[in-house]
Image (spheres, rainbow, N blue to C red):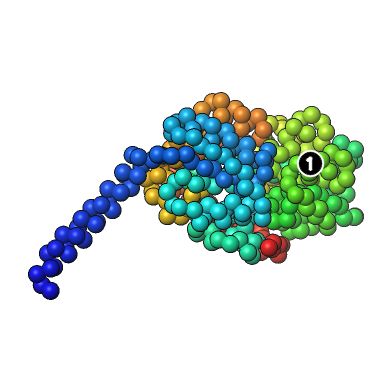
Amino acid sequence: MLAFRPARRALLLAALAASAFAQPAAAQTYPAQNVTVLVAFAAGGIADVVARLVGQKLSERLGQTVVVENRGGAGGNLAARAVASAAADGYTLLATTSALAVNDTASRNKGYATEDLRAVAIVAVSPDVLAVHPSNPAKDLREFIAAAKDKSFTYGSAGVGTGPHIGAEYFFREVAKVKAVHVPFTGGAPAVTAAVGNHVDAVVLTLPTVTPQITQGALRGLGLASPTRNSAVPDVPTYGEMGFPNVYSGSWVGFFAPAKTPDAVVAKLNGEINAILRQDEAQQRLKTIGFEAIFKTPVEAADYFKAEVANWGKMVRAIGVTVD
């Protein structure tokens, strides 16, 4: 037995050396094939818009085709589940929104653990907006809430458990203390259609979903759940300006990979994605629809996501919303 110990030690040292060089080697050879980005929501949504903007440029920078595929369903859980169980090699990525953080607490049957995914990059953020039909007598959020003190109202969202739904319920119940009846839709587009048709009293959505209707006058924006106004809709005041300070609710878009994806691969993707979003063209396209580009390292993105899970969890528990 003693005679074999040097050989075993040599094998162990060789294994450790191989492990040390594995991640740099992975970064040098990655990518060697097509990269697939699964978008957690339908075409035309905020995650889809950003994923396709990044995906097109990422193909050019990586020298490999980046295939963007919509895999909507289950409030974003369908795509998240698929990526969480995919090979941890950087060839299958998830493009999703703050719904991923919401679902950590709100969703009972995700089919994956949030820890099965790791943040690659958090790239864009936009506030939620409350908008009404132009015929609504309320000219601003203060008037709208004052009128709601006497009677309940209906508001539409992109679905139960979405970020705007959670943020709106928290605001109406915990801050404004008014009675609101939630009308969930199967996405942002049908919610906007209902609001334009005056079938609901209000709509609460992430700004890019409703920016065209506000700028064209089909809807009136009453308030942004953000610290500052947004250049895409400069005439829409913040909740704080309307007497409701420190009410912040919005959606971000980020890219995620299976949890065990090598650090070197994640770092490479993070660097390339951030470089794309630093281009003036990309930033202008995002600003036009109400997004603000943000740049975070892999560590910063991971910390940001962890904080988001905690923040959304607090709101979800306060209002008691759960989804299957």
Residue drawn at point x = 73 percent, y = 52 percent: 159
Tell me which residue sits at (24%, 56%) in the image.
Answer: 16
Q: Quadrant of residue 190?
A: top right
Which quadrant holds the N terminus?
Answer: bottom left
Q: Position of residue 307 (x, y in %)?
A: 54, 54
- On the rendered structure, is 251 left or right of 130? left
Whether residue 226 is visible here, answered yes or no, is no
Q: Quadrant of residue 316?
A: bottom right
Q: Name the residue at 48% across, 41% down.
A: 35
Seen from the viewer's position, the closer of residues 131 and 274 is 274
Q: Position of residue 92 (x, y in %)?
A: 49, 47
Q: Residues within 10 Å of mark 1 (few under 14, many from 20)?
A: many
Q: Amino acid at mark 1?
A: Val
Where is the C terminus found, in terms of image quarters? Answer: bottom right
- 112 displayed left or right of 107: left
Q: Which residue is mark 1?
A: 192
Q: Is residue 103 left or right of residue 197?
A: left
User: Which residue: 54% across, 58% down?
Assistant: 114
The residue lying furthest to the front in this view is 33
Question: Looking at the picture, how far across and down is residue 148, in whole percent?
Answer: 86, 52
Q: Secondary structure at mark 1?
A: helix
Q: Quadrant of residue 227?
A: top right
- Give the x, y percent position of residue 84: 51, 55
